[in-house]
Image (cartoon, rainbow, N blue to C red):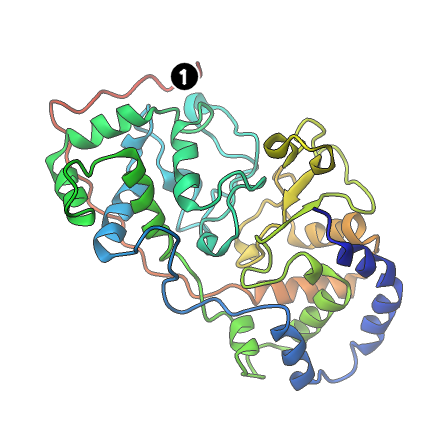
């Protein structure tokens, strides 16, 4: 699923790079840049987006917020969704790879949960079609929360306050406390985690003063050098899959040879080392970078992408401008109140020891 536009962008890069470098001293034509950007990107919506097969209601959101923060969904009752997708830390955990059950290091860097509802699929390899499916994965993964659906349901049913919340969120159902409904409630809550009104959004919505001159140069360079061939759309990525190392593979520390990306999902040889284009919204807050989490500096990450994906040695000025633009994609974060969770009862299962099996 290689995009031919990437090859075209890479082939044209030397001319584009020269043009961009020479244009840095020139005044940006806002009308032309806005028109160009609006053909590639969309602003983050200011209202909660609809999700497939799951009506988002206030009752589901409230329940999902509780479940997202409740460590009792994990076997050890130590780890919650918020552990690896910390809403106070850019929606991830700012670790190379997440620490899960038994203090195991996970295989990949934790993606941000902010704006994840706008992605075409979830996880680095796109193995989950939506947030409902995604929510079930970490709860059951041995290297993450290491729990079983029946134990999750037993735990929640043991607390009458949770049962009441499920009955309100899923009315007219005889037995609403199910693992599927756990996932639906978490998805409904995560649909609220959008970050609109960034300076970049305001710019493409028509405010020429929303970006600085450097941020505008960065946006122009981001487009001209071919970055937008993969990182486009509402989330500046998250919509399709591309080989990591189109022109030149990065080192084994950044691209571990044992992690073949989407190949594990499709078993198709051409999907080896293919990954979802990471969404770049709020990227200044989500270090370290790449699926391996081996790069902590955003400038370095931009430079690596220039070489590996576009075959270009970006100048320091180009990197600085692109980073300034990426920082301008940081939006307004929703206020999320940490919930008071239901009390356990004598019927609530005990936690298992926090050791790897």
Residue at 84 percent across and 52 percent down: it is 311
98 with respect to 265 (left or right):
left
284 with respect to 156 (left or right):
right
- Residue 2: x percent and y percent? 73, 48
- Residue 76: x percent and y percent? 33, 24
Which residue, given by chain and number where applicable, does mark 1 sit on? Answer: 355
- Residue 220: x percent and y percent? 71, 72
242 with respect to 51 (left or right):
right
In terms of image quadrants, where is residue 80? top left
Residue at 17 percent across and 35 percent down: it is 175
The crowd level at tag 1 (other Cα within 10 Å; few <14, some 14-19, many 20+) is: few
Report the label total: 1
Frontmost residue, 16 versus 297 = 16
Residue at 71 percent across and 54 percent down: it is 302
- Residue 322: x percent and y percent? 69, 64
Residue at 68 percent across and 73 percent down: it is 214
Relative to residue 262, is residue 321 depicted above or below?
Answer: below
Q: Quadrant of the C terminus?
A: top left
What is the secondary structure assignment of the residue under circle 1? Answer: loop
In terms of image quadrants, where is residue 173? top left
Residue 254 visible in the current orientation: no
Relative to residue 268, is residue 116 depicted above or below?
Answer: below
């Amino acid at each position: 699923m290689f995009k031919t536009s990437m090859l075209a962008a890479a082939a044209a890069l030397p001319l584009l790079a020269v043009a961009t470098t020479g244009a840095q001293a020139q005044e940006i034509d806002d009308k032309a840049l806005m028109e160009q950007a609006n053909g590639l990107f969309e602003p983050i919506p200011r209202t909660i987006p609809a999700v497939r097969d799951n009506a988002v209601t206030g009752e589901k959101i409230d329940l999902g917020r509780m479940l997202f923060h409740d460590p009792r969904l994990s076997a050890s009752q130590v780890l919650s969704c918020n552990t690896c997708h910390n809403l106070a830390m850019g929606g991830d955990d700012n670790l190379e790879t997440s620490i899960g059950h038994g203090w195991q290091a996970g295989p990949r860097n934790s993606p941000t949960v902010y704006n994840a509802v706008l992605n075409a699929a979830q996880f680095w390899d796109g193995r989950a079609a939506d947030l409902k499916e995604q929510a079930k994965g970490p709860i059951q993964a041995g290297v993450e929360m290491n729990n079983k659906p029946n134990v999750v349901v037993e735990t929640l049913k043991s607390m009458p306050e949770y049962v009441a919340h499920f009955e309100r969120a899923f009315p007219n159902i005889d037995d609403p406390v199910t693992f599927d409904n756990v996932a639906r409630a978490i998805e409904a809550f995560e649909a609220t985690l959008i970050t609109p009104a960034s300076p970049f959004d305001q710019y493409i919505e028509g405010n020429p003063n929303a970006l600085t001159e450097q941020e505008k140069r960065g946006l122009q360079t981001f487009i001209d050098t071919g970055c937008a061939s993969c990182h486009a759309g509402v989330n500046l990525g998250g919509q399709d899959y591309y080989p990591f190392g189109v022109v030149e593979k990065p080192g084994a520390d950044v691209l571990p040879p044992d992690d073949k990306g989407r190949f594990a999902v499709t078993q198709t040889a051409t999907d080896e080392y293919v990954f979802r284009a990471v969404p770049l919204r709020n990227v200044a807050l989500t270090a370290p970078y790449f699926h391996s989490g081996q790069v902590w500096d955003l400038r370095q990450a931009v430079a690596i992408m220039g070489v590996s994906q576009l075959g270009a040695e970006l100048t320091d000025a180009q990197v600085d401008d692109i980073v300034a633009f990426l920082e301008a994609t940081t939006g307004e974060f929703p206020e999320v109140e940490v919930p008071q969770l239901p009390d356990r009862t004598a019927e609530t299962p005990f936690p298992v020891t926090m050791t790897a099996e």
